[in-house]
Image (tube, helix red, strand yellow):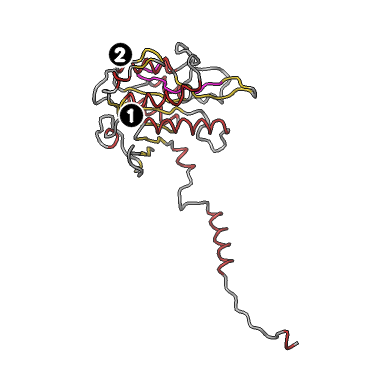
Amino acid sequence: MAIQDTQPSQKANKRKGVDRPFNIGDESDFSRASYPCASTLSIMIDELETDDHDNDSPPHNNAGDLVQSIKGMYRVLDLISEQGSGGLVDKIIIAQDSLQAFTNSVCPGSYVSMTKVKFNMLDGIIMKPVGIYGSKEEIARLLLSLGVVDDHIAAQLVVNHNEISVSKPSLRSGLYIVRTNCKATSDEQLFVVYWPEDDTWDDSAPSSVKRNRVTFMRYLRTMCDQIMALVSPEHVRSIVWLGQEDKDTATEMDKDEDEHDRMFTFEVEKTKEQE
């Protein structure tokens, strides 16, 4: 199930559609909006470089990192854990190596370092990113349908690492740019995918996971004018739709309303003066 959230950059109103068929070559709502490459990149750098993590981005030659096995996928924002005074603390940083690789793949030589980005070279490049978020299973299915991953990688992507004791290749939670065409063309469709943690969408998720979710979604909406939510059948069944509240709760509410709406007729038989 796909839910589209379109948010025009200069308008306050929003439009939503449900179960809209998706097509890479679709020139409808998905490909009407665009952002200059430089503007999106500068927003990210301005907001995140103040954390002073210039050299903290984990190395990208890790064999257990599935992003290395997915051609055309680039990590933009990474979720890492650092030792704090009270234990491990989650932090979101810019994945500099991967961001540099993506930027230079679009415009060679434009990204030299975090402090030396030739934005004038990027100003002429127009991108039309579509934001993607949702359950891991549905995102993996989308990547499979786009030909970005094969069946083996798709199966590895959906492994719940909270339920296994042996370390296996995985994709860290974060924001990823996915290119469906390795050659930069005017009609290339780009995706910005928010890859969640195992319990990101659980009602009982820890507060740290909820904070990460809010932060990543904020950046996703900043980077993308149009967003699609991919909802699994399991999540669809757990949604409480408006007007379809639990019957027991509705019955209790009806009883309470009946008690308040009930009218009684009284007749005075004797007053104090008559006693």
Image point 47% across, 42% down: which residue?
237
Badge nearest the viewer, 1 or 2: 2
Q: Secondary structure at mark 2?
A: loop
Q: Is residue 111 above or below residue 86?
A: above
Q: Which residue is mark 1?
A: 129
Q: Is residue 259 left or right of residue 240?
A: right
Image point 35% across, 15% down: which residue?
111
- Pointer 1 or 2: first along the chain: 2
Report the disc number at residue 108.
Answer: 2
Q: Are marks 1 and 2 in contact (CB under 8 Å)?
A: no
Most extreme residue toward the bottom, as rendered?
Answer: 274
Q: Amino acid at mark 1?
A: Pro
Crowding at label 2, few (<14), some or many (≥20) Cα neighbours within 10 Å? some
Q: Considering depth in this image, is 161 or 60 the residue closer to the camera?
A: 60
Examine the rendering and report whether any part of residue 16 can be seen: no
Q: Secondary structure at mark 1?
A: strand
Q: Which residues are magenta?
A: 69-81
- Image coordinates of residue 271 in percent, x first then y, are 70, 85
User: Which secondary structure class fits the magenta region best?
Assistant: strand
